[in-house]
Amino acid sequence: MNKNDITRVFIASDHRGVGLKLYLYEMLMADGYNVVNLGTDDLNTPVDFPDIADKLADAMLDDTQSRGILICGTGAGMEIAANRHRHIRASRVDRPEQARDDRFHDDINVLALAADDIDIEQAFLCAQTFLESPFDNIEKRIRRIQKIS
């Protein structure tokens, strides 16, 4: 996948993921991606992860060439909330190989990360792999994605 094929990378977190989100925002911008920070940027004011996941899903609704990164303490909350939207295919990832395989097999368009469980370098490698990995655009994979969409 060429970074020019991705129109925007939306990134958002709850209060527990602010530090990791801001780091990834800076690193991905430096890597040449058009990154849109959807908040929150205040680690001292609690926010509910479903609200953040909804905001990212809404931003991605009309932009099929965009990708999203969601961060909360466990990653699971964001993954669950994001997957309630029919156009979102989110996966919680903690290894680059997972990101590659989830893109290849399931065409995930949102990466969920656990701020409490992953170090920043590993998170950046996961994000890079997620953004660079292609989808295996064959009939059986397309058929399966259509069934969940």
Image: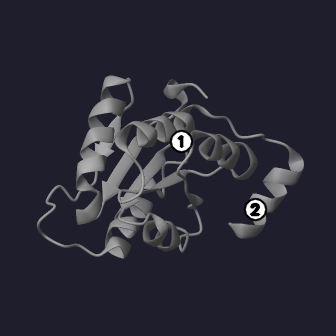
- Foreground: 3 or 105? 105
Q: Is residue 59 visible?
A: no
Q: Residue at x 36, y 56 (%)?
A: 115
Mark 1–mark 2 CB contact (< 8 Å):
no
- Residue 71: give x, y in percent of width and height: 37, 58
Q: Residue at x 67, y 35 (%)?
A: 134
Q: Secondary structure at mark 2?
A: helix
- Above or below: residue 24 compared with residue 14: above
Amino acid type of the residue that numbered disc 2 sits on in the rendered structure: Gln
In the image, taking residue 8 as reference, residue 139 lies left or right, namely right
Numbered circle sitting on residue 65: 1
- Residue 113: give x, y in percent of width and height: 44, 55
- Residue 16: give x, y in percent of width and height: 26, 63
> Cα distance, mark 1 to mark 2?
17 Å
Neighbour tally class for label 1: few under 14, some 14-19, many 20 plus, Cα within 10 Å:
few
- In the picture, the quarter occupied by the N terminus is top right
Q: Which residue is mark 2?
A: 146
Amino acid type of the residue that numbered disc 1 sits on in the rendered structure: Gln
Q: Secondary structure at mark 1?
A: loop
- Above or below: residue 85 compared with residue 102: below
Neighbour tally class for label 2: few under 14, some 14-19, many 20 plus, Cα within 10 Å:
few
**Mark closer to the chain start, 1 or 2:** 1
Q: Residue at x 54, y 74 (%)?
A: 84
- In the picture, the quarter occupied by the C terminus is bottom right
- Above or below: residue 111 compared with residue 127: below
In the image, taking residue 134 as reference, residue 34 lies left or right, namely left
Q: Residue at x 55, y 35 (%)?
A: 129
- Foreground: 80 or 95? 95
Numbered circle sitting on residue 1: none
Task: Determine which quarter of the picture holds residue 27.
Answer: top left
- Above or below: residue 84 compared with residue 140: below
